[in-house]
Amino acid sequence: MPLIDAKGVEIAEPVAADLILQPDAGLADILPRLGELAVIAVMFPKFRDGRGFTLARALRQHGYRGDLRATGHFLPDQFRFLAACGFTSFETPPEHQPGQFTAMLTHTHQPGQLLRRAVTRALESG
């Protein structure tokens, strides 16, 4: 699966994730190690699962400065919201070409109610 950055540009030489988190992961054990981790990947098991947004926001609020990667099932229309929550790289799902994500940077799109709620919760949870 192609890996792109927040501008939609393909990352030619991807670095493997140091840690892969499921959306229900607790941060207590991870927080002391944040400075040691260059890449943290957050799984999205379903595009309707907004917990990854909340997890990303929490990692950034706790000072994580490394590459935060979205992986799994997410949609091109979620691209801007993923970046707004702190994701910096995106392992694009096989059913979506990287160009679909890049197009969302210039496309004015009104997000659905479910996505709006997920992003609002992520931004308020800190």
Image (tube, grey):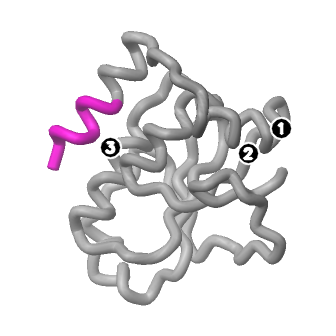
Give the residues drawn in magenta, as a range: 119-126
Report the residue marked by disc 2.
92
In this view, 1 is above or below 109: below
Task: Name the foreground residue: 59 vs 82.
Answer: 82
Residue 30 sits in quarter: bottom left
User: Does the magenta run of residues contain 95?
Assistant: no
- In percent of width and height, residue 96 lies at 79, 33
Question: Where is residue 64 drawn, in percent x and y?
Answer: 34, 73
Determine whether, in the image, residue 90 is placed left or right of residue 117.
Answer: right
- Quickly name the residue at label 1: 97
Whether tag 1 and tag 2 are in contact, CB under 8 A, the answer is yes
Select label 1 or label 2 by which is in front: 1
Q: Is residue 123 magenta?
A: yes
Tell me which amino acid carries mark 2.
Answer: Thr
Closer mark to the observer between disc 1 and disc 3: 1
Residues at marks 1 and 3, CA–CA distance in whole angstroms: 25 Å
- Amino acid at circle 3: Thr
Within-10-Å neighbours for mark 2: few <14, some 14–19, many 20+: many
Against 63, residue 83 (above or below) is above
Q: To which residue does mark 3 refer?
A: 54
SS for dot 1? loop
Task: Report, in whole angstroms, how far the alpha carbon at label 1 lies from the one at label 2.
Answer: 7 Å
